[in-house]
Amino acid sequence: MASKSTTISDIAKRLNVSTSTVSRALNGSKLVAEEVRKRVVQEAKKMGYAPNPIAVALKTGKTKTIGMIVPLINRNYFVEAIAGVESVIYDAGYDLIIASSGNFYERERKIVESLAQGKVVGVIAAVAAETTDYSHYRNLIDKGVPIVMFDRLMPLDGMSSVVQDDFQGAYNATRHLLEQGCRKIFHYRGLQNVSMWNAREKGYRQAMADAGITVQKGWVHTALTTPEEGERYARKLLAKGDIPDGILFSGDFAAKAAMEVFTENGVRIPEDVAIVGFVNEPWDKYLTPPLSSIEQFPYDIGKEAARLMLRAIEGGKPRKIVLDTELIIRQSSKKLK
Amino acid sequence: MASKSTTISDIAKRLNVSTSTVSRALNGSKLVAEEVRKRVVQEAKKMGYAPNPIAVALKTGKTKTIGMIVPLINRNYFVEAIAGVESVIYDAGYDLIIASSGNFYERERKIVESLAQGKVVGVIAAVAAETTDYSHYRNLIDKGVPIVMFDRLMPLDGMSSVVQDDFQGAYNATRHLLEQGCRKIFHYRGLQNVSMWNAREKGYRQAMADAGITVQKGWVHTALTTPEEGERYARKLLAKGDIPDGILFSGDFAAKAAMEVFTENGVRIPEDVAIVGFVNEPWDKYLTPPLSSIEQFPYDIGKEAARLMLRAIEGGKPRKIVLDTELIIRQSSKKLK
DNA sequence: ACTATATTTGCAAACGATTGCAAACCGACA
DNA sequence: TGTCGGTTTGCAATCGTTTGCAAATATAGT
């Protein structure tokens, strides 16, 4: 065991040439005689040579691996994004180092610092909810390591990003509720990640405004998009006896929990209150009733992010991409037949 | 931009000592005077020094990254396993390179070969369904790169593994069906990955035998565990009018699809036929009726795999771990109140 | 004070590749 | 035969560390 792999100088010895020649031959430099090139390439194949990526990385300062940081690994949205990234970079010959921040700033900082030591040529990241200080990313950029953000943006320039069009998504969902006859539509807004929730709230408000309905005080509720908070929200509405005829949730977990509370308490969905969520979790379609939601195509987001990364690695200018979302209409919001 | 990081020799220059001394001081060798060590460490911190992992890897031949190969990235089981692995190795200072084989042998081979170039110190893998030739893994072992298998095993020794106890899982599930009063219990067996399905089938047969029931010809059906095949299976049973009073599926996707067909055709679950699946997909609990299934704790499997890997990296002997599963009983199999 | 021993230090090679520069080689032409 | 231009080649440095070994310095014992 622990058999050594063949190196460039093994080949050189066998052929009685210098390592320089072998290196050049293998890299297709025109500084080697055609005849020699052939022999080197052939011998290399025979000996099962493969360049040592570590050595190459040390010499050239560039690895063939890309880093990806997500808040959570086991969230469908991120999983799909990872799959998307992987599918693209694999074909380009890159590896993917994955790390999760757990949404903690401190951990994210450590990860970024670790990646900054030259392990990766670029970083694709969705920043942690907790993060408000971006200097660790700033350092990366200063070191010449390109960054592509997705999902959540950072107020930093000099980097690419790809996000879904939250405004449009919320706008369309709200329109849909209006079309179903809803007038008193509430919005459950998320906490943290200001820009994202802002965009969604704006979309909601715009749609309401366009329909000539004024959003009254108390119609927008801000909380974490967890099941617990969703449940609490529903109970609060029930307690106040203030049930709207439609609700746009900024997350499916909260929506689902709220739906359960409503159903248990005799509030019918969608007849009494129509519900639309955000993110389109894989289990939405199995809920009773199936939950309408906004699909964000995280797999495609991942692919785009990866493409931007490859561009950036080759020195391309940063770009910002916004992808359309799609409203998936299911039972939970269909008042009309 | 592209600012260089401080190196060991930057520190050496500043302190008028040799790089050797700095290196030793930083690595806690006892070959440096205590006083010097202090100064070096302090200066290193001041200059924001962090060792270049690439250089270290080249010199020592050992990286601080572990490779992980899964058939599919976006399958709950694997996602959880990844999360488990990550949680353990992160604390040990390792990075995780992730690659998916798509269940294709050829792609798996390329991944393994790429990782074998010294990029990783160890590989945690669930082999592709298609794979029957294991020489690429053999090569890894021969190179001294430890391997930890999970989920699906390989007929190779010299490596660690961690799997769930499929036999016990199937046995318990079958017992449960028997306890609910089922006598004519069918088993939907998977295709490919022989060892896994074998274990499950054996568990099923053993439980039946222990209950004094002979499994008749035709009671075990072999097919892919996809929704499509599950649907086809249910239709076949309906067509033959041969509905058992219980079915143990080797996968939840097939079970779910079959349940839908049954329900559509007036076959009641669990009254007419009780159903238990395998894997406990996250949406099982939202189906109507909620699907009983066997939880395999992939997160824990990932953690164990990671621990075995760390052991192996430190030269520990290979070990094989088998984890218990847990039967999650839901509506779909509860005939008794 | 002087040697023997223990403690610290630095030189230089090595890991496996890449690359600027100088040297060797080639045929051709005068 | 000598020189020139072009093509091929190899030397040696380099990337940032680690580490065996020899050299330098400090400590101790007599």
Image: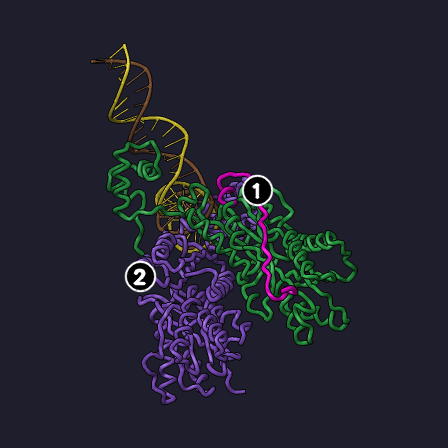
Chain colours: A purple, B green, C brown, D yellow
Q: Nearer the viewer, residue A319 or B312?
A: B312
In the rendered image, residue B99, in percent from the top left (x then y), is placed at 52, 57
What's the residue at 50%, 83% (across, down)?
A271
Residue that protrudes farthest toward the right in the picture: B217
Distance from disc 1 to disc 2, alpha carbons, whole Å, reads 43 Å
Q: Nearer the viewer, residue A1 or B10?
A: A1
For the N terminus of chain A, the image quarter is top right
For disc 2, the marked residue is: A134
Q: Circle 1 sits in a helix, a strand or a loop, which is it?
A: loop
Q: How many marks?
A: 2
Residue A193 to residue B5: above or below: below
In the rendered image, residue A228, in percent from the top left (x then y), is placed at 42, 66
Which amino acid type is shown beneath numbered disc 1? Arg
What's the residue at 49%, 62% (across, down)?
A86
What's the residue at 61%, 63% (across, down)?
B292
In the rendered image, residue A253, in percent from the top left (x then y), is placed at 46, 69
Q: In the image, which is nearer the foreground, mark 1 or mark 2?
A: 1
Q: Residues within 10 Å of mark 1 (few under 14, many from 20)?
A: some
For disc 1, the marked residue is: B319
| Apparent side of residue A159 relative to residue A337 in the rendered image (left or right) | left
Q: Which residues are magenta?
A: B308-337
What's the residue at 48%, 71% (across, down)?
A256
Residue B333 sits in quarter: bottom right
Residue A16 to residue A307: above or below: above
| Apparent side of residue B167 relative to residue B141 in the rendered image (left or right) | right
In the rendered image, residue B84, in percent from the top left (x then y), is placed at 49, 53
